[in-house]
Image (tube, helix red, strand yellow):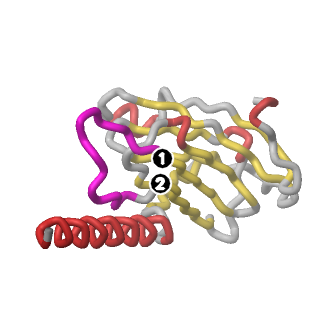
C-alpha cells in the first residue's frame, strides 16, 4: 500500500517536472546565429527533432520569424514518464537597420544535423514594410560539404507574399 502511494507521488512529481521543463523550453527563443556575406544574410536556427512540415518561416518588416510545432512520436510498449521537450518553439532574428533584402527570393532549408538555414539575398532597395513574406522550407538530408555550403546550392523554397493582416489558409497552399 505504502509502496503504491510512493510510486504515485513520484510519478506525479516526474510528470510535473517534465511539463515545467517543456514550458521553459517553449518560452525560451530558439538559439540562432546571424551571418552576412557580400550578397546575402544567413540566419541559422537550432531546430531539433523537426521535419520541414513542422516549420513556418516568415520575413516580417526587418525580422526573420520561425515557428516550430513539433510532435512526439509514440513508442509501442512504452508510456510517457517525463514529458520534458517543448512542442511549440519560436524564434526571431532582426536584421541590421540598414539591411536592404529581397525576401521574395529567400530560401529556407532544414539540414540533416537539425539546423534550419534561412538565406535572404541582399537587394538594391528595401522590402515594402507593409508586407510579410512566407518562406517554404525544404529538407536537405545530404551531408554538408564546404563547396555546397559556401555556394548555397540545392537550397530552394516556395515563397509567397502576404499582407500582415491576411494570413494564408492551408486550403490555398
Q: Does the magenta stretch include residue 68?
A: no
Whether the residues at callouts 2 and 1 have beta carbons within 8 Å, the answer is yes
- Residue 70 bears which disc, if any? 1
Q: Is residue 63 left or right of residue 126?
A: left
Residue 105 sits above or below residue 123 on the image: above
Residue located 53% across and 32% down the image: 138
The correct choice, above or below, for 31 with respect to 52 in the image is below
Quarter of the image for the N terminus: give it.
bottom left
Return the x and y of residue 155 as percentages of the image width and height: 52, 31
Which residue sits at x=83%, y=56%?
164
Q: Nearer the viewer, residue 169 or 148?
A: 169
Q: What label sits on residue 87 in the rendered view?
A: 2
Q: In which quarter of the image is the C terminus?
A: top right
Crowd band around label 1 with a 10 angstrom C-alpha radius: few (<14), some (14–19), many (20+): some
68 w.r.t. 62: above or below: above
Residue 38 drawn at (x, y percent): 55, 51
Question: Residue sitting at 81 percent across and 41 percent down?
Answer: 168
- Alpha-carbon span between mark 2 and mark 1: 5 Å
Secondary element at tag 1: loop
* SS under mark 2: loop
> Total number of numbered labels?
2
Find the magenta span and give its range. Answer: 70-85
Amino acid at each position: 500500500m505504502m509502496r503504491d502511494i510512493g510510486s504515485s507521488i513520484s510519478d506525479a512529481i516526474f510528470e510535473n517536472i517534465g511539463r515545467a521543463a517543456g514550458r521553459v523550453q517553449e518560452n525560451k527563443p530558439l538559439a540562432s546565429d546571424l551571418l552576412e556575406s557580400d550578397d546575402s544574410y544567413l540566419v541559422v536556427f537550432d531546430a531539433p527533432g523537426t521535419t520541414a512540415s513542422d516549420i513556418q518561416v516568415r520575413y516580417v518588416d526587418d525580422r526573420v520569424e520561425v515557428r516550430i510545432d513539433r510532435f512526439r512520436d509514440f513508442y509501442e510498449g512504452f508510456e510517457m514518464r517525463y514529458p520534458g521537450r517543448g512542442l511549440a518553439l519560436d524564434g526571431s532574428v532582426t536584421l541590421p537597420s540598414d539591411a536592404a533584402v529581397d525576401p521574395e527570393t529567400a530560401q529556407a532549408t532544414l539540414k540533416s544535423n537539425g539546423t534550419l538555414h534561412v538565406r535572404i539575398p541582399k537587394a538594391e532597395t528595401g522590402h515594402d514594410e507593409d508586407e510579410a513574406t512566407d518562406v517554404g522550407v525544404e529538407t536537405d538530408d545530404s551531408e554538408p560539404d564546404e563547396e555546397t555550403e559556401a555556394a548555397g546550392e540545392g537550397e530552394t523554397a516556395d515563397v509567397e507574399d502576404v499582407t500582415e493582416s491576411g494570413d494564408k489558409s492551408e486550403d490555398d497552399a
